[in-house]
Amino acid sequence: MSQSRSLRRRLELVGIGLTAILAVAMLGVLAVDALRSYPVFGGLYDQTRIAGRLLDSVLGTNVFSHPFIWRSVATGVLIGIVAPLVGTYLVHREMALIGETLAHTAFAGVAIGLLVNATTGWDGPLMVVALVVGVLGALGVQWLIERTDTYGDVPIAIMLTGSFAIGTLIISLDRTTGIDVRDYLFGNISVVTPSGAQLMAVISVLVVVTVVATYKQLLFITFDEQAARVARLNVTWYNTLLIVMTAVVVVGAIQILGVILVAAMLVVPVATATQLAYSFRETLYLSILFGQIAVIGGFVVSISQGLPTGGSIVVVAIACYLLAILASSRSTAAISTH
């Protein structure tokens, strides 16, 4: 049994290592895309276009020669890392719905950006406006939870419905942009602009660095918040940090998954991992691996069958979850905090 666990551990670490290499490669693709106007990067950009055409000829497709596909794939790979990473803490704190709430808040941000664009002629990235509104919404949820005597899910429900209502009202006022709002509701790989992909790259690096730096503190408040307060840990600060990280991840993820489906990547890979993991750290590792399986598998299904990418990713993620349930012979309560 010990040898089996040891082999499993090594396979997990290999998987995480390969995921890290893939993430660095995708960050490199986005960097080359952003800096292609410079001579050195321009040459690398041309090489990636050639590689895309070769890949198309091998696979019999006609998509990888287009830069937006690489931006979308890179964004998806990064989402497959940071969404389960943050979602692991949310699921174990029974805050799974917070992702859905912040996605609706980000939708209100997109609506505000569209309105500003129509009324002022401003042509800045909509994702930046969504990010600002999403962070403000996250801080608002945290403030409501701490300042009211209601159950924790009541402020979440109020913010979810209220922000979506605001977004729909603003959208109904703005009929001049020509942008299909359904792309932001259900996700669309064509929505991933260069600035949106670059924003996701920055978000991913910041979130991973922050989680690594505050791993022990976030773990402490996740499993015993009262003890953390007794130990004089600044629980309010770390709660706020977690909810803000969730907001920025959600904003980046709605480009691919849309407002309706974005919460799935925060929850489903983590739920899959908890069926198989024996510790919190192993849950983190496995949730990231299942996130990558969902993203890559979803892109394969989407491209090969001509189906929506967001829905394909979520369906693959749920399929992994069902298989994990069949493969698991124990309750998720067996997980430890190590």
Image (spheres, rainbow, N blue to C red):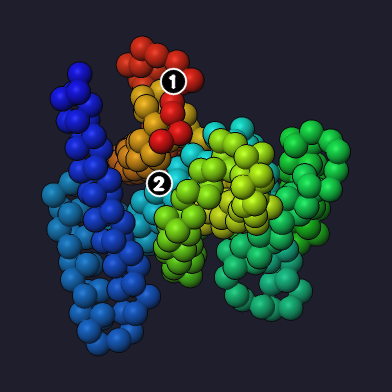
For marks 2 and 1, give the CA distance: 25 Å
- Answer whether residue 267 is visible to the viewer in this image: yes
Q: Nearer the viewer, residue 7 or 2?
A: 2
| Residue positioned 60% across, 36% down in the render | 224
Residue 80 tag number: 2
Badge 2 or badge 1: first in the primary sequence: 2
Looking at the image, is 8 positioned above or below residue 239? Answer: above
| Residue positioned 84% across, 48% down in the render | 147
Quadrant where the N terminus is found in the figure: top left
At label 1, counting other C-alpha atoms closer than 10 Å, the crowd grade (few under 14, some 14-19, many 20 or more) is: few
Residue 7 found in image quarter? top left
Residue most extreme to the front: 231
At label 2, counting other C-alpha atoms closer than 10 Å, the crowd grade (few under 14, some 14-19, many 20 or more) is: many
Residue 299 as seen in the image, left or right of residue 156: left
Residue 334 tag number: 1
Q: Nearer the viewer, residue 65 or 4?
A: 4
Looking at the image, is 204 positioned above or below residue 257? Answer: below
Residue 267 image position (x, y, % from top left): 51, 35
Looking at the image, is 115 positioned above or below residue 237? Answer: below
Indicate the amino acid at tag 1.
Ala
| Residue positioned 25% across, 38% down in the render | 12
Q: Secondary structure at mark 2?
A: helix
